[in-house]
Amino acid sequence: MIRILKSFSSLFLDIAETVTIGASFFLIVYLFFMQPHQVNGRSMFPTFNSGDYLLTNKVSYRVGEPKRGDVVVFHAPEEASCPTGTGCDFIKRILAVPGDTIALHDNAYFVNGEKLNESYIPAEFKTLPGKFIEGRTVTMGPDEYFVSGDNREYSSDSRVWGPISKSDIVGKAFVRYWPVKDWGWVEDVTY
């Protein structure tokens, strides 16, 4: 009987050790390296659908700088009117980086005086100005990034509430893992 109890307690300790090590590994990866995020809403359609799940790389911007075209997850600014206490995050594309000028006219963005070629946006989508950028050219400050959803008619973004700072960025979206049929790397875009 004692032998059976020793075997059972040894098995229990082995399982507890495995679970503890696995949970610790998951926690370290989640806190420091990557984090899952769900797309809510239509602001990034057709790139992402509402309900898609993405993994966000939390390391890349600790060692490098965000680039124009990157799809990023960031903490929504106060002006976005997220429900209090939700800590909501947004998923948008960076269109202008520190030092860039950006303007919006003729249904298109112009960065540093040149029209952005946004091949990922269907021709029938409209890019209307918001109160932040309407009728003017804006220069990004040393820590400012202009972000916009791909589906502009359904996106609350920098057109309305202005640029975000690097400290607001959680990370770069790098893989869509759900739904499984749409699994794949988030395509890098260069302008």
Image: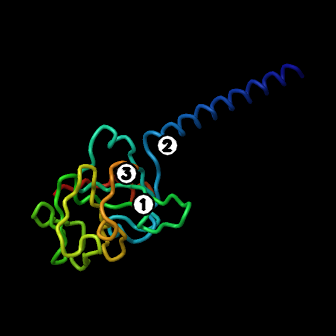
- Residue 141 falls left or right of residue 72: left
Instruction: Single out the residue that lies furthest toward the right.
Output: 1
Q: Which residue appears at 68% of the width and 31% of the height?
A: 15
The residue indicated by pointer 1 is 76
The residue indicated by pointer 3 is 169
Task: Give whichever of discs 3 and 2 has the lower sequence position.
Answer: 2
Task: Give whichever of discs 3 and 1 has the lower sequence position.
Answer: 1
Along the line of sight, which residue is nearer the eye, 6 or 56?
56
Q: Which mark is residue 85?
A: none
- The image shows residue 103, relative to residue 38, as above or below, that is below
Dot 1 amino acid type = Ala
Q: Which residue appears at 17% of the width and 56% of the height?
A: 100
Dot 2 amino acid type = Tyr
The residue indicated by pointer 2 is 30
Looking at the rendered image, the quarter that the C terminus falls into is bottom left
- What percent of the width, then of the height, locates residue 45? 35, 69
Task: Give whichever of discs 1 and 2 has the lower sequence position.
Answer: 2
Looking at the rendered image, the quarter that the N terminus falls into is top right
Dot 3 amino acid type = Ile
Which numbered disc, 3 or 2, marks the residue closer to the eye? 3
Q: Which residue appears at 27% of the width and 54% of the height?
A: 144
Pointer 3 with pointer 2, Cβ within 8 A: no
SS type, badge 3: strand
- What percent of the width, then of the height, locates residue 88? 48, 60
